[in-house]
Amino acid sequence: GENVEQHPSTLSVQEGDSAVIKCTYSDSASNYFPWYKQELGKRPQLIIDIRSNVGEKKDQRIAVTLNKTAKHFSLHITETQPEDSAVYFCAASYSGNTPLVFGKGTRLSVIA
Amino acid sequence: KAGVTQTPRYLIKTRGQQVTLSCSPISGHRSVSWYQQTPGQGLQFLFEYFSETQRNKGNFPGRFSGRQFSNSRSEMNVSTLELGDSALYLCASSLGAGAYNEQFFGPGTRLTVL
């Protein structure tokens, strides 16, 4: 089955800097890659997703890139703000009928 | 529109007992998935239900079971509790079945097994 590795497990950045979180997946058939954000004590929420027919997707300060050949995808957050502090989870699925497989999460701390 | 709700929010049980957790999806959502969240393992998929049918099941022992009712509400049951079952149990609902549909998570049930 699919396996998703996520790095780093913790990340600290200064406010205004960029943050990058990387995930690798094992099943080359995977074609859907969402990212969820979970603030402390709150529920996870979808922030961005990408499908395998595109290489990059942006939404304001966040972007996700996908490299199908290398089987990895990354979340990029620019101009980080304290409210970006949270745990971020990547996930992968190889069809709409299979469940999401999540990475173990990255705890991002933005230092003001 | 009301979000996903889960009851109870907190539970304390002892080893060997059983527990039932409940999840009410967003109105109109027919799919409910359950996840176990622990600090070391992240979010691990338990099962997915759609229209009262289990569509997928994760790699958990048979002590973990679930069901979905005709109103899309779902319950999960854990029998013969073990210390390692202590975790936050999250349910998520979506309009349709499968991973392509955005999942909306509930606040979770924090289960502590003593």
Image (cartoon, grey):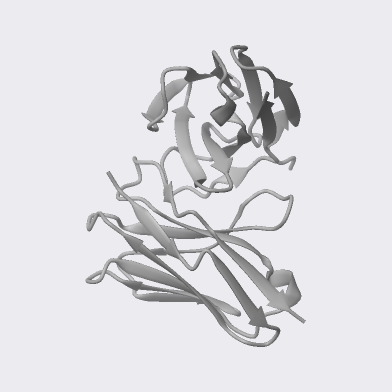
Residue at the spot 44% in from the left edge and 37% down from the top edge:
B97
Residue B68: image location, x then y, percent = 53, 20
Snapshot quadrant of residue A110: bottom right
Q: Please give left or right for residue A40 compared with residue A49 in the image.
A: right
Asked if residue B69 lies left or right of residue B53, the reply is right
**Residue at 64% across / 85% down in the picture?**
A79
The spot of residue B2 in percent (x, y) is 74, 40
Residue at horizontal 57 percent and vertical 18 percent from the top? B81
Residue at point 29% right, 55% down? A30
Give the percent coordinates (x, y) of residue B16.
59, 12
A4 left or right of A7?
left
Residue A45: quadrant of the picture: bottom right
For the C terminus of chain B, which image quadrant? Answer: top right
Q: Is residue B17 above or below residue A39?
A: above
Q: Is residue A59 visible from the viewing direction of this image?
A: no
Work out whether A15 lies above or below B97: below
A7 left or right of A68? right
Q: Quadrant of residue A33?
A: bottom left
The image shows residue B8 at horizontal and vertical percentages of: 74, 26
Vertical relation: A17 (above or below) B17: below
Q: Nearer the viewer, residue B81 or B56?
A: B81
